[in-house]
């Protein structure tokens, strides 16, 4: 009898323990499903967007019999904060959201970006749900979603370095540079030894916003030493000598011109800093013109972005038949910069032509990207 009573007691204890465990389970479950949350903890929108940034707000509860009004606050990160009225405007009724009866979620506008022409990088705003009764903030699987960080993505290119040759001294009459017979690196400005000379400048020390440069010359097959167009000219000269230039300049009043080099002229520009793998959409912009004529195989130009690792592959190379395909009209090109060039470096531009009619005009060149 004692054994039977003992076994009966054990069975009763197990039943009681099992029933307690089930009651605990049911007591825990309801509270884990009562929460309010944003659909995600991060989102982004382009600065150029004319539509607002929207987000889904979730109200998870067994009771959806009536409208529910939730609140949220607006704050800013310590790094790259956006400015209201400068970078964005808040939506009407900002700070509250009504979840209609019968619904468990609703999509609301948070902000509308303000587009401008300033490249100041991406900026962010933080929206945080306020406590609501005993509801948990954030999703059960993503408690961070109690807040959402909206990042306004920059769409304007920042100019890391440029020149349109506007700051280089020039003259209003057609003068030519006394091209050397041999290779010279760097080419001297004639004004260094002759302050009164009006020969075009071939090297320029930056004094303003534009890049400075040095010019070097490598002779090819030199049949005659002549004074040729080599340096910066202005539109007064180009207009007065239309048969020689065939065009006037489109980016400002000045441009770098070469013709009949009988060799290779290289412009090495000042160092450009700020390029790094964090820069997006890096590009080289260039405007140039080839005069209409017959071009030889080696005639044209090539542009590199030289870093500590060397010249690398050309950003742009136009020679031979490609020149004749483009001659006679202004070309404006935007060339992507490869990832291995995203470092401190310098533009290196080499031009080659061998006849007086073979004129190359570089009107502007720049390196840009989104910070």
Image (cartoon, rainbow, N blue to C red):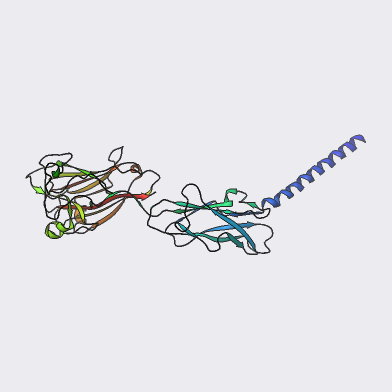
* Image vertical order of residue 300 relative to residue 184, above or below: below
The answer, for residue 303, to whether it is visible in the render is yes
Q: Give the residue furthest to the front.
A: 195
Q: In x, y percent, where is residue 126?
A: 53, 52
Q: Give the residue furthest to the top.
A: 2
Q: Give the residue furthest to the left.
A: 224
Name which residue lies at 62% across and 59% down.
Answer: 70
Quarter assignment of residue 65: bottom right
- Assign the N terminus to one quadrant of the image: top right
The answer, for residue 142, to whether it is visible in the render is no
Closest to the observer, 141 or 132: 132
**In the displayed structure, does residue 362 sit left or right of residue 104?**
left
Q: In x, y percent, where is residue 335?
A: 30, 51
**In the displayed structure, does residue 220 sit left or right of residue 62?**
left
Closest to the observer, 366 or 220: 366
Closest to the observer, 333 or 367: 367
Name which residue lies at 57% across and 59% down.
Answer: 95
Q: In x, y percent, where is residue 287?
A: 25, 54
Closest to the observer, 252 or 65: 252
Name which residue lies at 68% across and 55% down.
Answer: 133
Q: In x, y percent, where is residue 78?
A: 49, 47
Marks counted in the figure total 0
* Image vertical order of residue 25 relative to residue 250, above or below: above
């Amino acid at each position: 009898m004692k054994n039977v009573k003992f076994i009966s007691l054990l069975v009763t204890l197990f039943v009681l323990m099992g029933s307690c465990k089930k009651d605990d389970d049911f007591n825990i479950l309801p509270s884990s499903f009562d929460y309010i949350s944003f659909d995600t903890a991060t989102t982004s929108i382009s600065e150029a967007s004319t539509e607002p940034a929207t987000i889904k707000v979730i109200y998870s509860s067994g009771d959806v019999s009536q409208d529910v009004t939730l609140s949220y606050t607006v704050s800013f990160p310590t790094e790259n904060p956006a400015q209201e009225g400068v970078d964005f405007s808040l939506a009407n009724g900002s700070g509250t959201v009504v979840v209609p009866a019968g619904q468990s979620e609703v999509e609301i506008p948070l902000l509308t970006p303000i587009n401008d022409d300033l490249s100041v990088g991406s900026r962010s705003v933080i929206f945080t749900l306020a406590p609501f009764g005993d509801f948990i903030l954030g999703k059960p699987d993503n408690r961070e979603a109690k807040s959402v960080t909206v990042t306004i993505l920059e769409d304007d290119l920042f100019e890391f370095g440029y020149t349109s040759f506007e700051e280089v001294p020039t003259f209003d009459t057609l003068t030519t540079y006394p091209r050397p017979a041999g290779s010279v690196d760097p080419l001297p400005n004639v004004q260094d030894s002759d302050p009164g000379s009006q020969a075009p400048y071939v090297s320029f020390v930056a004094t303003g916003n534009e890049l400075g440069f040095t010019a070097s010359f490598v002779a090819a097959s030199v049949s005659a030493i002549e004074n040729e167009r080599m340096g910066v000219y202005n539109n007064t000269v180009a207009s007065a000598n239309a048969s020689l230039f065939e065009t006037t300049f489109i980016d400002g009043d000045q441009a770098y011109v070469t013709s009949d080099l009988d060799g290779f002229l290289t412009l090495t520009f000042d160092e450009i800093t700020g390029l790094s793998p964090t820069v997006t959409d890096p590009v080289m912009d260039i405007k140039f013109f080839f005069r209409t004529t017959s071009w030889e195989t080696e005639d044209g130009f090539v542009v590199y972005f030289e870093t500590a690792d060397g010249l690398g592959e050309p950003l742009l190379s136009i020679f031979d038949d490609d020149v004749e395909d483009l001659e006679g009209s202004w070309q404006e090109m935007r060339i992507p910069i490869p990832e291995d060039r995203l470092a401190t470096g310098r533009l290196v531009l080499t031009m080659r032509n061998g006849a007086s009619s073979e004129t190359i005009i570089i009107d502007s060149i720049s390196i840009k990207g989104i910070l």
